Amino acid sequence: MKSIFLSILFCLFPTLVLACIAPPRSFTVDHAELVQRTDTIVWAKAIGGSEDTSDIWGKEHELMLFETIEVLSGYVPKRFTIPNGFALSGWKQGVGSLETDFDSHRDLSFWDENNARQWNSADCNMYPTFSVGNSYLLFLGAPHWKAYEAVKSEDDLWLQTVRNIIAQP
């Protein structure tokens, strides 16, 4: 009887089967290691949606198109998309939302390795979301909870920290 119940439950809620018990360690390494292991880091503004793509459940999403503000390391064209980065609409901004910048990353809660604007999905992959008009510090090719942070100004502490780490020999 128990196995029948579980079979029905998994058929009704297939994401339970795909559930990520714990994020990969690479998603939560400290910020210095994240910067050091990432070849391309860019501060960019989300300027609009591009082509549609579907997620692992077949739901259609619009990929976000970015315009480069500053390349901190590596190379990225003036305009680019992130294959797993989707346009976000209808979410409230502010601390506790998907668009928080943690008070320009001066809020101590951001520096806790278990806190970020984005987290991994139930399948242990990252599907970050972005809002048109907002700017983000992006670590391309390095999925991590802090790889897609909202950065609204030059004096953002996360942006300054990353610049300082890159400048160290």
Image: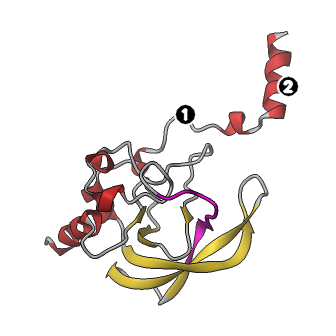
Residue 131 falls inside the magenta stretch: no
Residue that lies at the very extreme toward the left in this rendered image: 169
Image location of residue 138, percent across then percent down: 42, 69
The picture places residue 166, in percent across and down from the top left corner, at 22, 72
Q: Which of the colour schemes (rainbow, by chain, secondary structure, one colour) is used?
A: secondary structure
Q: Amino acid at mark 2?
A: Ile
Secondary structure under the numbered disc 1 in the rendered image: loop
Secondary structure beneath label 2: helix
Q: In the rendered image, which residue does mark 1 sit on?
A: 21
Question: Front-most of 153 and 66?
Answer: 153
Q: Residue at x 57, y 52 (%)?
A: 125
* Magenta segment boundaries in residue numbering: 81-93
Residue toward you, 23 or 100: 100
Res. 75 visible in picture? no
The residue type indicated by label 1 comes to Ile
Q: Residue at left 80%, top 26%? A: 9
Marks 2/1: CA distance?
Answer: 21 Å
Determine crowd level at label 1: few under 14, some 14-19, many 20+ residues with C-alpha closer than 10 A: few
In the foreground, 137 or 123: 137
Q: Residue at x 79, y 21 (%)?
A: 6
Where is mark 2, residue-wise?
A: 8
- In the picture as drawn, the residue positioned furthest to the top comes out as 1
Count of labels shown? 2
